[in-house]
């Protein structure tokens, strides 16, 4: 397995422990971990960390302390505690992601908010005549739905045009993605237009693939794209993040997905530049004009506690061997192992090779399930949740005309995939439950068309 | 427990189930995280007086407040009783327990339940008119973004006016700058008198401001009016001002009532505005943070959107606001629990409002008498906050003096109270230039205001001057 290639295309730099050394007692045991996640519904095979993430009880306890501090004496907290706490979180993140300056790091609710900030800025450039009508925004067709709607709301509305690049899937190599992207940029430049913004996922959501983000950003620079926005909702805690290396203008990642924060918090990195950045938080407060990081630190009275626990999360991950790097590596290895187990049991495939996966893997579903639409996929997902206590997202792969598709062991075309996630609280039984649920459906000749109602 | 006749039964059942809920942890056997109401034994009929919340129960509900502090500033950040905090925790745990199921099955219907409860409370016509957002600051951005689009897309002419009060909240002013000025609108600020002696003074000044807005054939596209100004705090005669706006052909009226619900009467049909926003975490016992934004369906308000665009874009503001990406929506889900809390008080929220008003005036007049100063407005122009003049001898001569005095009160006397600098008018000598804004909420006690009285009197006795304060 080309493990080295998977993080920014770089060598990984986690610590290798001498296997003969005994484990230090300060590391969490399996029973400690179960206790940290005891609030999870024990009956459920929760193999979908990717959608909503998770938060251990020690971090929840830290959050509660912050909440109580506000409730206890809110004025004092507002004047003396809040900003310092936010700066502490931002400082930790800034160093984790290798930003030059903590000013480049703002805290917002989630990637959806960051997308609105970037796209509002692009929208203003169109409205105020800095961009020409029909100039383009280029993105992948599997960009998150909220981002697409945000483009509609802010860019299309003011005359910008969009180009969607179809992500090859299943995919076997980074080159396939890079070529498709180059084609997309060419389209975006056709007829004398300028590509004003490229939106690139670091890890796509559905279908889930680890993208060659550094190469894609390089291609953007080569091809004269004005700005690059990397939507890395899943990245931090999943894959090593080095924003200088990646070289994007904007980079956002949710900390509540893979970085053990409570809902919700994301960091939004805006590369420092000589000119006025003109990025603003859409919820304008008295801090307007003081820079995005300061604007985002006060958007009216709210509960900021989820943004204040980042130092506590660092304590939590330090109780794992290898810290967050160790967690990421083990999550990846285990996810791939489970993925291979599943596609072996079902006679199907992985959506991408292991080096193009993080702690999430797409596994083809048996063709005999007859998943023929998005509705079928949703039906199957609900069935698995309600009747089998398995929580896993299901993806319907609509094949285009002329596409052959990949066949499974029954020589049927694979039209759907599940996306499994692996986080520290998962156990092998979770994936075995999924395996058996699908295997039994096939054995009983169930299809999406005759699934029992939920 | 013994059976009771019907009205007492309801109150006692509510009290019993309240106590039961407080001590219960979430379990999957409940629906909506709430235990079934306990059913009183119907065999014996005994009449008991209604069991309203007692003083010690109130103390207990707010026992998380910092004990040494005289917390007489409910207006800034509000307050939340522990039973509502416990309800919020239940909701947070439901998400953490199985977030996908919560997202698919529980979130939307429960936000709808909160919205329906608010719609009834504020006398709106349809649930659709009620959206839940984080706070009034967010609501302002939503309304003003719509105004900006109208300018950008040519529905409004460059130079058309937006009229607002000079005492509008700082964040709202910045929002007007960011959205209206930037897109070509002209901003007119109406100066209001302070101290103020009658609602008429405000009405007259507003008429003047509106006339200015319409000067040179301009159209006034939006009037942005506070229901209760923040600093200095005064209850604005909002019904009259909205009517004037209608008479004068203002396109849209947006009422910023951050201090509205739980503080003043909030009746959408009576007030008649196009948009009305109020925080629930200030005076309605919600945890931080939740506010409603009311948008009259039949009104001129067209296409409002939440600025954080999600897959719900285009489904109407109320639905867009139910999902702005993964976040903690628990503060929006506790409205039914808040109603249970306020209904433990005699007269419910109306009783609370009335008693808060009476108490804050009583305390204000006590302070005025002791300090030899005055209130910032007559009692009928206050709700649960009042501006009280500070002794002139303290020498509050700037905003930074006011801030430093506030810090001193917090640090030396453990009193939390906002201070206000009122610049002397032309030709005024020896006028009152410093005010404090006292709030009264159910957890407050007269001792706290006496402590403030004594602290200020001590400073006066010591010959204290603000000029002696450094940062």
Image (spheres, rainbow, N blue to C red):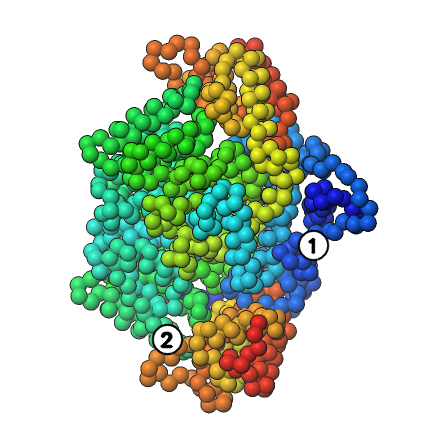
Query: Where residue A44 appears, x then y in whole percent?
Result: 62, 68
Q: Is residue A314 visible?
A: no
The residue shown at (24%, 47%) is B155
Q: Is residue A184 visible?
A: yes
Q: Nearer the viewer, mark 1 or mark 2?
A: 1
Question: Are tags 1 and 2 found on a single chain?
Answer: no
Say which chain tag 2 marks. Answer: A
Mark 2 — residue? A168
Query: Where residue A27 appears, x then y in whole percent?
Result: 65, 59
- Please determine whether, in this image, residue B190 is positioned above or below residue B100: above
For the residue pair B201 and B453, the one nearer the viewer reads as: B201
Q: CA distance from mark 1 to mark 2?
A: 53 Å
Query: Where residue B243 appears, x then y in whole percent?
Result: 36, 33
Counting other residues with Cα less than 10 Å from the Cα at mark 1, is it few (<14), some (14-19), or many (20 or more)? Answer: few
On residue A25, the disc is none
Say which chain tag 1 marks. Answer: B
Mark 1 — residue? B36
The residue shown at (52%, 75%) is A380
- Please determine whether, in this image, residue A33 is positioned above or below residue B68: below
Query: Which residue appears farthest toward the left when viewing the image?
Result: A192
């Amino acid at each position: 397995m080309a493990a080295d290639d998977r993080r920014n295309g770089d060598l990984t730099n986690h610590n290798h422990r001498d296997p003969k050394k005994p484990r230090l007692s300060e590391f969490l045991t399996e029973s400690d971990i179960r206790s940290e996640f005891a609030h999870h519904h024990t009956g459920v095979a929760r193999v979908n960390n990717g959608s909503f993430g998770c938060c251990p009880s020690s971090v929840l306890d830290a959050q509660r302390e912050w909440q109580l501090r506000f409730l206890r004496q809110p004025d004092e907290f507002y004047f003396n505690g809040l900003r310092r706490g936010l700066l502490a979180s931002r400082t930790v993140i800034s160093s984790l992601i290798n930003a030059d300056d903590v000013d480049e790091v703002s805290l917002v609710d989630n990637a959806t908010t960051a997308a609105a900030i970037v796209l509002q800025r692009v929208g203003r450039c169109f409205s105020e005549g800095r961009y020409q009508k029909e100039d383009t925004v280029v993105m992948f067709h599997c960009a998150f739905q909220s981002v697409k709607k945000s483009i509609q709301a802010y860019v299309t509305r003011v005359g910008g045009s969009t180009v969607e690049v179809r992500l090859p899937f299943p995919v076997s190599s980074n080159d396939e993605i890079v070529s498709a992207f180059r084609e997309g940029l060419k389209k975006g430049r056709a007829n004398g237009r300028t590509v004003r913004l490229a939106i690139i996922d670091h890890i796509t959501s559905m279908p889930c693939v680890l993208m060659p983000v550094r190469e894609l950003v390089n291609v953007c620079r080569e091809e004269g794209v004005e700005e690059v926005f990397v939507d890395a909702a899943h990245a931090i805690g999943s894959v090593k993040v080095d924003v200088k290396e990646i070289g994007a203008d904007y980079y956002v990642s949710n900390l509540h997905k893979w970085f053990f924060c409570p809902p919700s918090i994301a960091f939004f990195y805006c590369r420092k530049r000589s000119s006025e950045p003109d990025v603003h938080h859409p919820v304008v407060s008295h801090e307007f004009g003081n820079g995005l990081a300061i604007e985002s630190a006060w958007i009216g009275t709210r509960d900021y506690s989820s943004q204040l626990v980042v130092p506590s999360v660092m304590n939590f991950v330090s109780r794992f061997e290898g810290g967050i790097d160790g967690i990421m590596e083990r999550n990846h290895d285990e996810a791939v192992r489970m993925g291979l187990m599943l596609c072996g049991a079902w006679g199907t495939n992985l959506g991408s090779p292991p080096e193009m996966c993080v702690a999430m893997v797409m596994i083809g579903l048996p063709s005999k399930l007859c998943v023929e639409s998005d509705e079928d996929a949703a039906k199957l997902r609900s069935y698995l949740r309600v009747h089998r206590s398995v929580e896993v997202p299901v993806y319907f792969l609509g094949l285009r005309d002329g596409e052959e598709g990949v066949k499974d062991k029954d020589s049927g075309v694979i039209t759907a995939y599940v996306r499994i996630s692996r986080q520290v609280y998962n156990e092998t039984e979770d994936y075995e439950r999924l395996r058996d649920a699908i295997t039994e459906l096939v054995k009983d000749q169930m299809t999406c068309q005759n699934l029992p109602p939920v | 427990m013994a059976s009771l006749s019907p009205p007492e039964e309801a109150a006692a059942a509510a009290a019993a189930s309240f106590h039961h809920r407080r001590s219960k942890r979430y379990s999957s056997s409940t629906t909506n995280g709430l235990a079934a109401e306990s059913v009183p034994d119907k065999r014996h009929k005994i009449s008991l007086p209604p069991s309203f919340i007692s003083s010690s129960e109130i103390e207990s509900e707010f026992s998380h407040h910092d004990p040494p502090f005289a917390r007489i500033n409910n207006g800034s950040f509000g307050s939340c009783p522990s039973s509502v905090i416990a309800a919020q925790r239940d909701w947070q745990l439901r998400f953490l327990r199985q977030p996908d199921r919560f997202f698919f099955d529980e979130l939307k219907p429960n936000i709808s339940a909160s919205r329906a409860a608010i719609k009834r409370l504020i006398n709106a016509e349809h649930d659709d008119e009620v959206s839940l957002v984080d706070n009034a600051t967010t609501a302002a951005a939503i309304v003003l973004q719509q105004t900006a689009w109208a300018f950008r897309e040519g529905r409004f002419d460059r130079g058309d006016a937006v009229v607002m009060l000079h005492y509008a909240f700082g964040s709202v002013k910045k929002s007007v700058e960011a959205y209206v000025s930037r897109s070509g609108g002209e901003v007119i600020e109406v100066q209001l008198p302070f101290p103020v002696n009658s609602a008429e003074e405000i009405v007259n000044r507003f008429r003047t401001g509106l006339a200015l807005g319409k000067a040179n054939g301009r159209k006034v596209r939006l009037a942005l009016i506070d229901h209760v100004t923040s600093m200095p705090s005064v209850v604005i005669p909002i019904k009259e001002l909205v009517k004037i706006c209608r008479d004068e052909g203002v396109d849209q009226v947006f009422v910023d009532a951050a201090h509205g619900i739980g503080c003043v009467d909030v009746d959408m049909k009576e007030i008649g505005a196009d948009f009305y926003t109020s925080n629930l975490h200030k005076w309605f016992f919600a945890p931080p943070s939740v506010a409603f934004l009311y948008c009259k369906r039949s009104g001129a308000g067209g296409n409002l959107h939440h600025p954080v665009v999600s897959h719900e874009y285009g489904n109407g503001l109320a639905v867009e606001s139910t999902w702005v990406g993964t976040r903690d929506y628990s503060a929006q889900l506790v409205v039914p629990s808040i109603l249970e809390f306020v209904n433990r008080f005699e007269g419910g929220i109306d009783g609370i409002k009335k008693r808060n008003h009476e108490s804050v005036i009583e305390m204000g007049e006590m302070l005025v008498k002791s300090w030899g100063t005055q209130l910032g407005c007559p009692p009928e122009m206050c709700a649960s906050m009042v501006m009280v003049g500070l002794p002139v001898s303290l020498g509050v001569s700037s905003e930074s003096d006011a801030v430093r005095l506030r810090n001193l009160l917090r640090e030396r006397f453990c009193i939390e109270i906002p201070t206000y600098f009122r610049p002397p008018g032309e030709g005024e000598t020896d006028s009152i230039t410093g005010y404090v804004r006292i709030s009264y909420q159910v957890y407050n006690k007269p001792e706290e205001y006496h402590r403030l009285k004594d602290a200020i009197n001590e400073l006066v006795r010591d010959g204290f001057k603000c000029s002696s304060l450094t940062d």
